[in-house]
Image (cartoon, coloured by chain):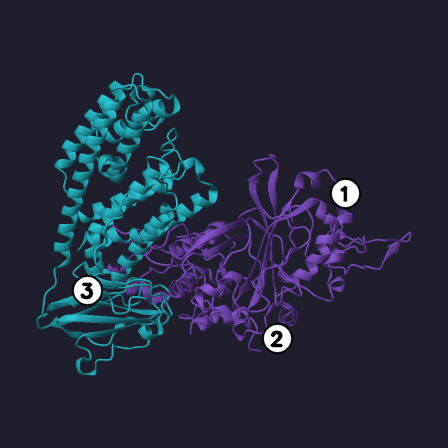
Amino acid sequence: MPNREPTDRERTDSEPTDTSRRLFLGGALGAAGLVAAGGAGFGIARAAEPADANSSDVVPFYGPHQAGIATPAQDRLAFAAFDVTSADRTDLQTLLAQWAAAAAQMTKGQPIGSVETAPDNPPIDTGEALGLPAAKLTVTVGFGPGLFDERFGLAMHRPAALKKLPPLPGDAFEPDRSGGDLCVQACADDPQVAFHVIRNFARLARGTAVMRWSQLGFGRTSSTSTTQQTPRNLMGFKDGTRNIKAESAEEMERFVWVGAETDQPWMRGGSYVVARRIRMLIESWDTDYLADQEKVFGRAKNSGAPLTGTHEFDKPNLIAKKNGVPVIDLNAHIRLAAPVSNSGQMILRRGYSYTDGIDAQTGLLDAGLFFLAYQKDPRKQFVQIQQRLGQHDLLNEYIRHTGSALFAVPPGLHAPGDYYGKSLFA
Amino acid sequence: MPRLPRPAAAVLATICAVAGVAACSSSGGGGRPSAAGAHAATVTITAAKGCELNATQFAAGGITFTITNKDATSVSEVELLSGERILGEKENVPAGLGGQFAVKVDAGKYTVYCPGAQQERSTITVTGKAAAVNENVAALLKRGTADYKSYVDTQVGYLVSTTAKLNTALEGSDLKAAQKAYIAARPYYEKIEPVAESFVSGKQNLDADIDARAGDVPASKWSGFHLIEKSLFRDKSVTGMAKWGAKLVADVGLLQQKTKHLSYQPPDLANGAQELLDEVAASKITGEEERYSHIDIVDMANNVEGAEQAFADLEPAVQKIDAELARQISNQFAALGKVLDKYRTTSNSSGYVLYTTLNDADRRALAAAVKAVQEPLSRVAGKVASA
C-alpha cells in the first residue's frame, strides 16, 4: 500500500520531535552543545524540555500525499491565492522551492530563517510565530489553471481535470475573490501559526507572484476523521456528517487521491481542491422558524439526526414518507448532497467558518462558510454535485457563492530537497 | 522625468546567476580539470552536515563557487566573507536548487558562510597573487556616496530655484501661473525627502515646515507646500499666499545650507531609497499627499527616481557582492518604471494624469510593483554596511 498515509507511530519515528519555535541565536554562538539534544540542528537552540513533549503537535510534512487533506481538520485556516507576475520560468521554480523549504521549517515549528540577523538586515523570518508550538500546522500548495498557460512552458503538463469551473447555478461572484495561479492552504490549531505561513509566503513571492485574494477561517466546519465530532456551521447545523473520513482508505482512493486514471502521471497521489466562499445571509436565517430550518437541511437542529432518525450518524432514509409526503424534503440539503443523488459521488469537505466583519453597503454581517472540497476529478464530483445543489437546494435562499477557485494539488514531497512541481521543471 | 542612466553590467557578473538551471546545478566545479580546486569551489549543503567544500586551498584570482543545496530546508544562501565583510554571495538557493557566484580575491583567509546550516562556517585559504586587482568594493562605495551627495546638492539647488519662482508667482495674481509653479517645484522635494527628514532637532522640524499636510501639525503651526496647495487648488486663490511663499523660500534655503555639510554612509543610501518607496506605498498610493492638486503620481514618480538614483550609486558595489541581487533590483525598478509610465500624459503640465483617475486595480498594481522593489532592496543595507 504505497499510497497510504503513515500511521502516527511511523510519523513520530521518521520526523524530528522538537516542535518549539525558538529564537535563532545565530551562527556565532556556536550552538553545538545545544544542537546535540535536538539532532537536526540549524543553529537553533533546542528546547530543554523532554524531546517528546509536543510531538503530537507536528504533522509530518513529507509523504506520499500533501498533508492538510487527510489530516484531521485543524481548528483554524489561513488561505491565499496568488497570481504569478513574473514570466520567468526560473523565478517560478525558485519560488516553489523556497515555499517548500519554508513549509518544511514552519510545520516543524521552526522559523524559515534567522530572526536575529545583522542589525542592518531585515529578519528573514517575520517572527510572529516564535515561541508558539507547531500547532499541527499543515501547508498545502495547489496550482491553478493559469499556471499551465503559455507563460512557463508547462502547457503540456496540464491535467484535463484542471479546467476552470463552468458557470454554475447560484454563482454570485464578487470581484477579486476568485481564481489564481497558485494557492496555499495553511491549517493549524493556532491562528497566528496559520497566518504566519501566508505572510511569509507572500514575502518570499515578492517580485514573482502577488496575492490575489485571501481568506481566514476561524473555525472548522468539517470532521475528516472518525476521531472528531462534527462541528456546527454558522447556521447552527451539523452539516457534512457523512463526509469522507481519512480512516477509510478505500474512500480516499476512490474519491480523493488522483490515481492511474489521470492523463498526467505527475498528479498521481495528488488531488483537486475547489474553494468556494459561501456567504450566508445569517440575519434572514435567524428569523426563519425552526421547522423550516430543519426542513432546509433535512436534519434536526439540536441532535443533528436526519429527520428520519434519532442520532446524528443514523443513515437518512430518503424514501420515508409521512402522510404521503417525503419526511426529508425532495430539495433538502442532505438529500441533494447525498451520494445516492449524485451517482454515488462523494467529496472530502474541509471547510471553515469565516467572517469578514460587516458588509459596508448594508451593515449586515459578512459571514459564512469558506468551503474547501478535495476530490480526484472535479468534473465528475464537485461540478455534478453543485449543478444539482445550485438549482434545487432549499438552502439557496440563504446563501450566495461569492468566490470560487480550482487548484490541482500535486502529490506530497518525498523528502527535503523535493519541491512543488519539481518533476515539471526537469 | 528622464530615466536615469544605468551603470553598465559589471564585468564580474556571475557566469550562471540563476538558480536551479540544470547546467548550473549539475556542472560540478566548472569543468576545468587542470585547475581543479584552484579556481573552482563546489559547495554542497545538506541538512546533516551543513555546508561542505570540495577543497580548502584556492589560488588567488577569480574563484567560482558552485552551490548545490541538497536538502537543507533552513538554508537559502551562501556568502564569502573576509572577516565580516561580504565579498560575494548567492541568495535564493533553497533545498533542491543550486547556483553559482564568482569573486576575485587576493591571498588570505576567507570564510564561506551558510546562515542557518548545521555547519555554518568553513575557512578557506587563498594563496598567490591575483593578476589584476579590481577596484575594490570600498572604493566603489566611497565614490557612490560622493555621487549621491552631489545628486542631493543638485536637486536641492533646483528646489531652491523653483521655490523662488513659486514665491514670485504667489506675489502676483495669476492663479494658473501659481498652480504651474507649484507643480514645477514639487518634484525636487520628493526626490530627496528622507534627507530633509533627517533634520529634526528640538522644535525645528524642517520636513514638517516644508511638507506637512493639513492635520499633520497643529493648524497654527501649519506652513509649506500643502498650505499653498490648498489655497491654489481648492480655494482657487492666490490671495494672502505671498507670506507663505516667502517662508517656504526661507525654509528651503535653510535646507540647502544644512545639506551642504552632510556626508552619507552607504547604508544611508539604501535606507533612504527604502524610505522613499515607503512614501509611495504608504501615502502617495492613497492620494493623501496631494489631496487638492491630485498630482500624487508626480510625487510617486519622483520618489521612485530618488530611490533609483540612491540605488544606482550603490549598484556597482552591489554588483560585486551579489550580481544577481543587483540585477533583480534593477529589473524591478524597471518594471515599476513601466507601471508609472502608463500614467504619463502630455495634456497636464505635470506630465502625469491626476490621481483621481486611478482605480483600485491601478493602485494594486502600483503597490505590488513598489513592494517587488522593496523586498530585494531591503537586503542591500546589510551588505554595504560592512563592505
Q: Does A122 appear above or below A421?
A: above
**Same subunit: marks 3 and 2:** no
Q: Amino acid at mark 1?
A: Leu
Helix, strand or loop status at disc 2 = loop
**Which numbered marker is on residue A290?**
1
**Which numbered marker is on residue B11?**
3
Helix, strand or loop status at disc 3 = loop
> Farthest residue in the top direction?
B240
Q: CA distance from mark 3 to mark 2?
A: 53 Å
Q: Which residue is mark 2?
A: A261
Quadrant in the picture for residue B60: bottom left
Colour that chain A carries in the picture:
purple
> Badge 3 local density, few (<14 within 10 Å), some, or many (20+)?
few
**Residue drawn at the location 26% of the way across and 28% of the way down:** B210
> Farthest residue in the right direction?
A323
Sequence-earlier tag: 1 or 2: 2
**Residue drawn at the location 16% of the way across and 50% of the way down:** B144
